[in-house]
Amino acid sequence: SCSTSSSENISLSGAFALYPLAVKWGEEYRKLHPDTRIDISGGGAGKGMADALAGAVDLGMFSREISPAEKEKGVWWITVAKDAVLPTISASNPFLGNLQQKGLSSTQFRQIFITKEISTWGQALSSANADKINLYTRSDAAGAAATWAQFLQWDAKQENLQGIGVFGDPGLAEAVSKDPLAIGFNNVAYVYNINTGEKRPGIEVIPIDVNENGRIDPEEDFYDHAGSLLKAIAGGKYPSPPARELYFVSDGLPENKAVLAFLKWILTDGQQYVKEAGYVPVDTAILQSELQKLNGK
Amino acid sequence: MRNRKKTEEWFFRNLMSAVTYFIILILLLIIWVVFQKGIPALSWEMVSQTPKGGFYFGKDGGLLNAIVGSLYLASGAASLAWLISLPTALFMNVYLVRYKKFLTGIRFLLDVLWGIPSIVYGAFGFALMIFFNLQTSLLAGIITVSLLIAPIMIRAMDEVLKTIPMGLLETAYSLGSTRTETAFVIFFRQALPGFITAFLLAFGRGIGDTASVLFTAGFTDYIPENLSQPAATLPLSIFFQLGSPIPEVRERAYAAAVILTVLILIISLAARLLPRNFKRNVI
Amino acid sequence: MSYNLAQPDPVISISGLNVRSARSHILKNISLQIPRNKVTVLLGPSGCGKTTLLKCLNKLTDLYSELTVSGHVYIDGDDIINTGQDLSAIRQKMGLLSQKPYPLPLSIFRNVSYGLKIQGIRDKNTVKAKVEKHLREAGLWEEVKDRLDQPASRLSIGQQQRLCLARGLAVNPEIILADEPTSALDPISSKKIEQLFVKLKKDYTIVLVTHIMQQASTLADHIVFMYLGEVIEQGTREDIFERPKSPVLKEFLATGH
Amino acid sequence: MSYNLAQPDPVISISGLNVRSARSHILKNISLQIPRNKVTVLLGPSGCGKTTLLKCLNKLTDLYSELTVSGHVYIDGDDIINTGQDLSAIRQKMGLLSQKPYPLPLSIFRNVSYGLKIQGIRDKNTVKAKVEKHLREAGLWEEVKDRLDQPASRLSIGQQQRLCLARGLAVNPEIILADEPTSALDPISSKKIEQLFVKLKKDYTIVLVTHIMQQASTLADHIVFMYLGEVIEQGTREDIFERPKSPVLKEFLATGH
Amino acid sequence: MIGRQLIDKLSSGWMLVCTSLLLLLPLAIGTGLLAKSIPVLEHQSFFSLLSSAQWSPMEEKFGFYPFIISSVMVTVLSFAMAGPICLLAAIYLTQYARPVLLRIMHPVIDILAGIPSVVYGVWGILVIVPLVADYIAPLAGSQLTGYSILAGGIVLAVMCIPYMLNLLIEVFRNIPRELNEASLSLGATRWETIKFVLVRKGMTGIISAFGLGISKALGETIAVLMVVGNVVQVPGNLLEAGYPLPALIANNYGEMMSIPLYDSALMLSALVLFLIIFLFNSLSRYLIYKTELT
Ligand SMILES: Nc1ncnc2c1ncn2[C@@H]1O[C@H](COP(=O)(O)OP(=O)(O)OP(=O)(O)O)[C@@H](O)[C@H]1O
Ligand SMILES: Nc1ncnc2c1ncn2[C@@H]1O[C@H](COP(=O)(O)OP(=O)(O)OP(=O)(O)O)[C@@H](O)[C@H]1O
Ligand SMILES: [Mg+2]
Ligand SMILES: [Mg+2]
Ligand SMILES: O=P([O-])([O-])[O-]
């Protein structure tokens, strides 16, 4: 299928979310295989998918759930990294303490983001406060938004999320941190500085009340530091969704040996660079099954 | 009577100057925001190196790929657009002068093309690429951007050619010139300064456009070595780095904006100053 | 009105020429013979169609979509109005000196050599010699010989007018069409151009439009008086100035300077 | 050169007027008196600065940022060059008829009524009467009375020239500045305008630029001869035409018609 | 001699080809977009696509009404701000100001026309959105986020200024100075001359410049979408969020082009935009034609 590329040439295109990580992988891989040229270009997840299916590139970088229509076209995919979406508020939110104690459950989030049954902070926290909740979402079609919607309601899509649409992750983070009454959601890397593990200034996380008992139990409390959060994601204590997988896609199993070798390296040695990019490495169990896929199983 | 007139004149004169300075103020404010955010992140490394691994995590490297890519793309597109625009504009003003209605129609279509958003050109270019089985490449970007700027160029050239007096056309013909000679020797020379301005302004427009190259030229860390490789551009580099989670990387986006602004400034000054050297013979 | 000049071999022969615009009939059924190697002067009040008639001789009316031209104009026997032929060759036969001078956007030298280039004459020395010759003919050589490479646009209007004449002569025309060549000029420059015409008339057929009676009477061999798009009267200088027939012409002459 | 016309009450008095552009000195230290209710003719070769001088009288030089003007121009005693005063009132005193007619982008009627509107005259009947009166004065009424609402740009050049004159008369000026008003006109139209000037000269002060000697000699009470930005000679018709002193003027007159 | 004729034929051919190519471009873009819109047109009638307000692409329900209305609102608003401002400034710069100011203005205008729209978007978020949220919204008595039609309109107005101003300056510069002289010498003040003569003379140019400015505003994408709020709703007032057509395309095209019906719907929205621009240009041509007659 990838007849257009020579065996020593690998081309990728697609989601900007994966571009920096792919560049890093490409560079590290070339240190080991200097005769391989890796062309990586951005353009968006759909572009990556379209290019991959048209055979214009070897691999598409893909950052959202693959839709049934896309699956019908016979796309092949492989998980290369994980990410998680976190509900966020401003650090100057007046109810911050209360929120961190009680957390919000997925039902409550649904009532806030989808049905709008909850529209004031009082309703969310069972108090009399009448301050409105300022709701923000992503305007650009985003994996984060789709995953967040799926977490709130299994069949919901990005288009079901209400609120002001802001372009891009940083835009959303900025809008939320500036507005004390805001609520939004962000990918991990936009909430935590991965190098230090600290939260970025101005932004806070609303802990998810997974067992819906109305408070945050110790085992639900891992948001202080990126390290503990990533562990919780990898260990499944943080629910999935809103944790999600990032893929490379292609038009059927790649035939090009160089591409297969590159993918294999990503799934093994390549995983050490994932954290640096602000993503979560794939769990060992999944890695194993993905490696199987490379062998055509 | 006199008094009312004076008051009116005074009022409007001050209103107009206030509005003008207000515009200048806003414009300077924008430029200031860009520079103030961009200068701190600007360094020699930014303009002299391509991104190294981890550049997008705030590590070493520069924007050379985007600077060179932008220059390649804009000069390629401006040249290609020139090849289409020049004959068209001359054709309109030498061959079609007597078909006023037809000319009105052409100018109408040009205005329509002018108004089509660049993202639609981008989508159209992408569809063409798929159709001709082209890959994301410098060439595809050049073609798309040239389609986008050709109407701008033609319009600017047309404005210049329109002002050439009928008498010059009559003179050329009465000396026995063919239409080609009239177009390329006489009209071309007369309008050359205007053409240069049109070229450079279209070049500036091409270098600043994001949406049309997003799907056609791609984005890559390499400097393209031939037309079939993808190329990065400054606007896309700005767009893309602004989406980074890492604040230092977002700072660099502003540095890229400063570089772009300076490039455009150079082009603009050239567009206004260069033609003077070609004004010698213009009647 | 359809009176024909007894002329054995007219260069230009016009018959039944009509020019119409959407709202008016500019030239009405003109029939006329222009004699060879003579000066024919077109006379008539402003707006009577003199410039339009000149443009028909050259078929420059092509450029104006709002004008419809019908009838016949024979140049040396070829009907240029109804031809599919190469007009650029026919236009080379005629030098046009327009009401306002239009120098080409080139240097003084190249303005004159332009016509030679078109004719395919490229030999440097020939070109140089010819440029000098025609500039001398136009009485401009002394004034510009030291600055031939300067833009023609820097010349004064009078000089431009003479440059355009030299340029027209350089294509080696048979006919010179001159449309009020002195209207924008001061008396000194006017005089120079008039003297030139006297000299040129030996070798060229000249059609001259002018408002200045004195110019007409100095230069004309044959005078055509037009009024509201029609040729009212034509004849020799004496016919027109001393024995005018129609009342309009009489009035026109009475008020003329 | 600083010879003063013995004139009890000049309308315009110019002293030490200089106009410079970046590269040249266009008017050089001009001092001049324009007598009341007389026709003053400015004579001189093309490019000598006549038009520029006229523009100074009106301070239209304001519009040309490339020109620097210094010196004094007194209109009825007010120095307009160095005034902070309301120029529009002073300009209303002077009707300008420019070398090429520029009709306003309005209908024929509104071109003439424009000045009235500016003066605040709005009464329909008054305006109508005045428009008719001035169009008659300019000899245009008969030709346009049926199409007053048509755009002025559709008139022929000669008609436009007369329209501009009517427009200028309508503001009730004291002074008329006319810059070669007949250069584009046929003898009949020229004659009409000349006759009009003869009539107007009773009530108005007229400053006229012309290249036509005969016009100058018919109309002028006072003639000013300019050369390369300087006033070389001035005097009555007889002084200039019959007793010219400077060699340049003699040569100029010798070649003139 | 034969050579000259041959060259003439060849170059005429080349010119004709280029001109036809360009004239075919709108047609090609139009039919290209139409061809790609066919799936969604088969799925839902054109009329219901235009008039429906429900936008649920994943449920395959497409309604463009809110987007069209938002586009119109943002465009009209930005034009209402930028149009008069540019006109006044162009007059000032050409008629009153010293030439130096105009000479400084040109590079400034070029820079602003060349700055990518992302940068305007960032500027809008930094300056305009807070301005609307903190100062303008409270005036209207509401507590809002600032992401609104108003913010979009303001940013768009600023972006249109360089284009319109540039064209308008040219219009006024090309009016012969003698016309100015004629009016002034009749005793009109500068302002009367401008009001009665120059604006009238330049009317076709002004309409044309406004037309191009509005086209530009209609089609502008990134900067607007960064500040306009992107809520699929018919905005009740200027302080509410809206979602213009170009933003719809830009937000989703790169991400969703691999889902056929979604892709088709986005292409249809581009087609609708194209049609609006086409109609709009026809209107401005008609106005020009009308003013040329008088
Ligand atoms: N392109 C045109 N469209 C419509 N009418 C025209 C056109 N050209 C000339 N006319 C009209 O034809 C008539 C004759 O014009 P022409 O220029 O031939 O006059 P003319 O005799 O040369 O006058 P003048 O002495 O003023 O130059 C005029 O009434 C003019 O308005
Ligand atoms: N705005 C200007 N900038 C620079 N030079 C100018 C300007 N206006 C006029 N001049 C120059 O000043 C000189 C006098 O020009 P002016 O128009 O007054 O001449 P004129 O006597 O009216 O000539 P003509 O009889 O040809 O109309 C000319 O050399 C001209 O080139
Ligand atoms: Mg004529
Ligand atoms: Mg003059
Ligand atoms: O698709 P995103 O990674 O930008 O949420």
Image: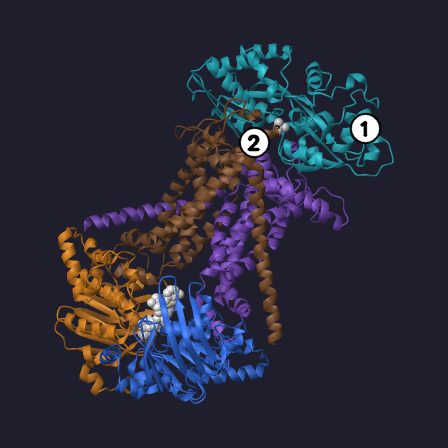
Chain colours: A cyan, B brown, C orange, D blue, E purple
Instruction: State the quadrant of the C terminus of chain B.
Output: bottom left
Residue A113 percent across, percent down from the top left = 74, 33
Front-most of residues A105 and D173: D173
Task: Name the residue located 57 percent from the left edge and 45 percent from the top edge.
Answer: B30
Q: Chain of mark 1?
A: A
Residue lying at the far right in this picture: please name it: A128
Relative side of D75 to C107, left or right: right
Can residue C233 be seen in the rendering of this structure? no
Amino acid type shown at disc 2: Gln
Please state the total of marks drawn on the protein image.
2
Q: Which mark is residue C28?
A: none
| Disc 1 secondary structure class | helix
Q: Which residue is mark 2?
A: B241
Residue A230, quarter of picture: top right
Q: Chain of mark 2?
A: B
Residues packed near mark 2 inside 10 Å, few (<14), some (14 to 19) or many (20 plus)? many
Can residue C124 be seen in the rendering of this structure? yes
Relative side of A288 to A226, left or right: left
Residue C210 percent across, percent down from the top left = 26, 75
| Disc 2 secondary structure class | helix
Residue A272 percent across, percent down from the top left = 59, 14
Callout 2 and callout 1 share a chain: no
Q: Is residue C61 above or below residue A233?
A: below
Residues packed near mark 1 inside 10 Å, few (<14), some (14 to 19) or many (20 plus)? few
Q: Which residue is mark 1?
A: A97
Q: From mark 2 to mark 1, how far is it between C-alphas?
A: 34 Å
Image quarter for ligand 5: top right
Relative side of E66 to C28, left or right: right
Task: Name the residue located 35 percent from the left edge and 53 percent from the top edge.
Answer: B191
